[in-house]
Image: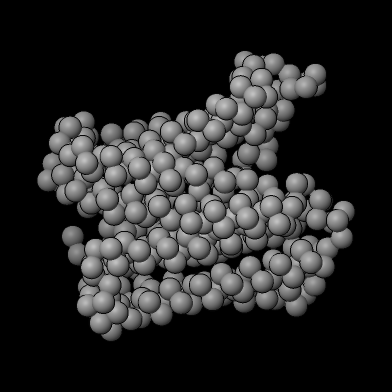
Amino acid sequence: MTPNPLLGVLFHWLGGLASASFYVPYHGVKRWSWEIFWLTGGIFSWVLAPWFFAYVQTSDLFGVMGQVPGSVVGMCIFFGILWGFGGLTYGLTMRYLGLSLGMAVVLGLCTVFGTLIPPIVQGRFVNEIAGTTSGQIILAGLGVTVLGIIVVALAGARKDAALSPEQKAEAVAEFNFPKGIAVAIFSGVMSSCFAFGLAAGEPVKALSAAAGTGPLWTGLPTLCIVMFGGLVTNALWCGWLILRNGSAGQWFGAAAEGGARPPMLANFALCALAGTAWYFQFFFYTMGESQMGRFGFSSWTLHTASIIIFGTLWGFAFKEWKDAAPRVRNMVWSGVGLLVLATIIIGYGNRLAV
């Protein structure tokens, strides 16, 4: 099948929408501690959804997994563990900075590291990318993406600087700018490790293709391995919090701190929805990457740009920008416009390379 970069851009937009939306259902979870709803949703994100969709779409999934070299499995899990630190602190970033500003900082760093490091390590950057017209166009798109992220982040900083403490608390209940920025920087660097895990899993894609899996789905088995690493990190951290806070009983309907009992069915359903949405960002990512041709590394930029676009829209939906000055709101829309332009530039660059 001939790659279709324009279709790939669409898939990446769908993945970005899923990623930007995953935290929204958690807002509806009642009387569960953070570690309880985060780990509950994570079971769907890192275990149930990856293996279910890989099993449905992959030819002989378990036969393919049995052929993967141990060194490949180890590297995928290792980068998944590092990515797990990013995902874990990503949730904390949302708590301290809100959707718009938190995503801008995290994904800005994640974009640069996750896009450029794999081709540099593979020795492809100078000749295949920087030395070709299509590669240069894609790099220009990366530059526009970073510019758009900076504009969105600056708009968020100006918005927050102008708010009173009461307004900040209304928009983001646990707003803490210094703590949030520190967590966001760490999260951004660690989150880029997912791209490294996917690069390490290229042999898994080849085995899946050899087993007869269609090109859109060959990346799904790799997700099972990398996300297992994410499960390890998050399960250890949440397990420690559960022991420290004595919150395990909430899974069985115990009231938190003497309050009312949690709505169990609704909480589990919302966590399942959130966790599955988190997984779908990478489900669509692998589909989009399959359509980008020989410059598949650019998928990471498209992925993060689309997350910020839709994350900013959610920020407006949650009224995080309602008290911002008109010029600040215009600024953030300018940043979103730059990100949309970047996806077009990158898609065009990939189209030239087909």
- The reply, left or right, for residue 220 in relation to residue 256 is left
Above or below: residue 217 compared with residue 122: above
In what quadrant of the picture does the N terminus appear? bottom left
Residue placed furthest toward the left = 210
Task: Measuring from the top left, give residue 153's x and y in whole percent.
Answer: 63, 68
User: Which colour assignment does the render follow?
Assistant: one colour
Figure quadrant of the C terminus: bottom left
Q: Is residue 168 left or right of residue 209?
A: right
Residue 163 found in image quarter: bottom right
Q: How many marks?
A: 0
Residue 146, visible in the rendered structure: yes
Q: Residue at x 80, y 72 (%)?
A: 325
- The spot of residue 118 in percent (x, y) is 31, 61
Residue 82 vs 237, above or below: the answer is below
Residue 311 in view of the camera: no
Q: Check the image and report above or below for 315 versus 145.
A: above
Q: Position of residue 283 (x, y in %)?
A: 38, 47
Give me the residue at 15% from left, 36% from top. 67
Q: Nearer the viewer, residue 174 or 264?
A: 174
| Residue at 18% from the left image edge and 44% from the top image edge | 208
Where in the figure is residue 124, as x and y percent of width and height?
Answer: 23, 70
